[in-house]
Image: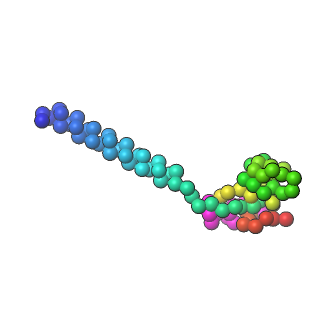
Amino acid sequence: MNRTAATAALAAVLVLSAGVSMASADDHAKAKVEQEKCYGVAKAGENDCKAGAGTSCAGTSKADYQGNAWKHVAKGTCVTIKTPTGMGSLTPKA
C-alpha cells in the first residue's frame, strides 16, 4: 500500500469513529431525564396538567404560577424553583 492510500484509509477510519462518537453523545443527550410534577411554576397556558375544575388539562391554566397547575421538571428541582409568588411545590398550592 502506498503512502497516499494509507493516509486516505487512516483518514476514513478517523472520520467514521468520530461519527460514531457524536451519535453516542446524541443518544445520551436524548436520554429521558426522570421528572416530577411541580405545582405553581407554570406560566398561564403553559401547564402540563391539573388546572382545576372546568379545564381540559394541559395548557389551560388561567394565571401565571397558578397553584393547582403543574409542570414536569427534572426530578429533585421542583422545590428549588423560585417564582414571583414563591417556590415550586410537590403538592397543589392554595
Residue at image coords 81%, 60%? 68
**Who is closer to the viewer here, 90 or 50?**
50
Q: Give the range drawn in magenta.
A: 74-86
Q: Quadrant of residue 17?
A: top left
In the rendering, at what x and y percent does residue 20 appear?
A: 37, 46
Q: In which quarter of the image is the C terminus?
A: bottom right
- Residue at 84% x, 57% y is 52
Residue 83 can be seen, yes or no? no
Within the image, what quadrant is residue 33 found in? bottom right
- Residue 33 in magenta stretch: no
Task: Name the residue rendered at 69%, 66% in the picture.
Answer: 79
Residue 49: tell me if it is visible. Answer: yes
**Left or right placement of residue 36 versus residue 85 in this view:** left
Residue furthest to the right:
54
Question: Which quadrant is home to the N terminus?
Answer: top left
Q: Which residue is drawn at 81% across and 50% down?
A: 56
x%, y% of residue 53? 86, 56
Counting from the top left corner in percent of width and height, residue 43 is at: 76, 51
Q: Does residue 21 sit above or below 68 in this rendering?
A: above
